[in-house]
Image: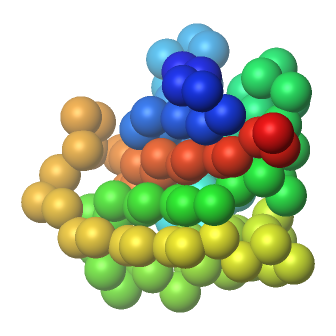
Amino acid sequence: MVKVGNLVLIGGTTSVQPDGSVYGEGDPYGQARYIFQKQIALLKQAGAEAGNVVKVEAFLVHMADAAEVGRAYSEFFRDVRPLCTMVGVSELNRPAQLCEIEITAALEG
């Protein structure tokens, strides 16, 4: 996470847990939900919340998973509706990872 002026940038976040294992193997919805939970916690550390998010970028190994990642996105950002882009990639750094997500938030003032 980086704060630049009134922006909070959270780089590529995956569902890797503190013990190094991948949360939600085979479950794109579960992985995306876990990632958004991690990112919301980071936002709080920066003095922001889900309502401050203006952009979400998701990198998916299988574009067929877009609906499931979108379902998780909607749980956190239904009322906010930040810009959301999903891009297909050939692989992430671990075979069990199905998605990686970046977010940008704007603080007031």
Name the foreground residue: 2 vs 101: 2
Image position of 8 (left or right of 13) = right
Q: Visible in this render: residue 4?
A: yes
Name the foreground residue: 52 vs 42: 52
- Residue at 82% x, 79% y is 78
Q: In which quadrant of the rendered image does the C terminus lie?
A: top right
Q: Position of residue 88 (x, y in %)?
A: 23, 70
- Residue at 18% x, 62% y is 89
Residue 96 drawn above or below residue 21 = below
Question: Where is residue 37, by image quadrant?
Answer: top right
Q: Visible in this render: residue 24?
A: no
Q: Position of residue 63 (x, y in %)?
A: 31, 80
Count of picture labels = 0
Residue 69 drawn above or below residue 35 = below
Q: Position of residue 52 (x, y in %)?
A: 78, 52
Q: Position of residue 65 (x, y in %)?
A: 43, 78
Name the foreground residue: 26 vs 8: 8
Name the foreground residue: 29 vs 26: 29
- Residue at 76% x, 33% y is 43
Which residue sits furthest top?
19
- Residue at 33% x, 64% y is 60
